[in-house]
Amino acid sequence: MARALLESLAAERPGLICREVTAELVWVLEQAYGFNGHQVANIVEELVSTEGLVFEAQDDAARAARRYRRGVAGFFDLMISGAARRSGAHPLYTFDKKAARLAGLVPMGGT
């Protein structure tokens, strides 16, 4: 059904993938379907390049997918980091020790 929907979209009648949908998609692929980071990154990259789809924060999603494939950080952390970078909000503070390893993030002493 999803494939049929994607095939019905066109540049003059596009579908929108907002940031929240991207996050939900990644969560479902990992939790419900057991996909690994490489598989998730491939799907996100495929969707980003799909004609007829408009991706909110397209550059953030594509960059997050590339970095997620390499295991740099969690996908959501990479999207948050991209939003902060794009908006000029630096430094970005986090309680997440793994996310704090990303450039521009400052640890706050959390988990």
Image (tube, grey):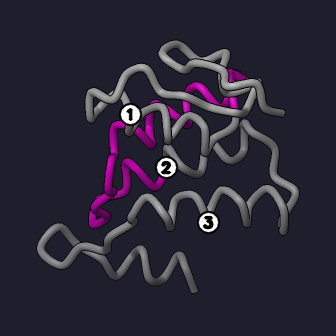
Residue, x 39% and y 66% (percent of image)? 17
| Separation (CA) of disc 3 from disc 2 | 16 Å
Q: Is residue 9 left or right of residue 42?
A: left
Q: Are marks 3 and 2 in contact (CB under 8 Å)?
A: no
Q: Residue at left 50%, top 41%?
A: 79
Position of 77 relative to 10 (above/below): above
Residue at position x 48%, y 16% in the image: 104
Marked residue nearer the N-terminal end (2 or 1): 2
Residue 59 within the magenta-colored segment of the rendering: yes
- Residue 93, image quadrant: top right
Badge count: 3
Magenta stretch in the rendered image: 47-73
Rendered image: mark on residue 24:
3
Give the SS element for disc 1: helix
Q: Amino acid at mark 1?
A: Ala
Tell me residue 34's x, y (percent): 87, 57
First along the sequence among labels 3 and 2: 3
Residue identifier under label 2:
46
Q: Quadrant of the N terminus?
A: bottom right
Q: Which residue is mark 1?
A: 84
Q: Secondary structure at mark 2?
A: helix
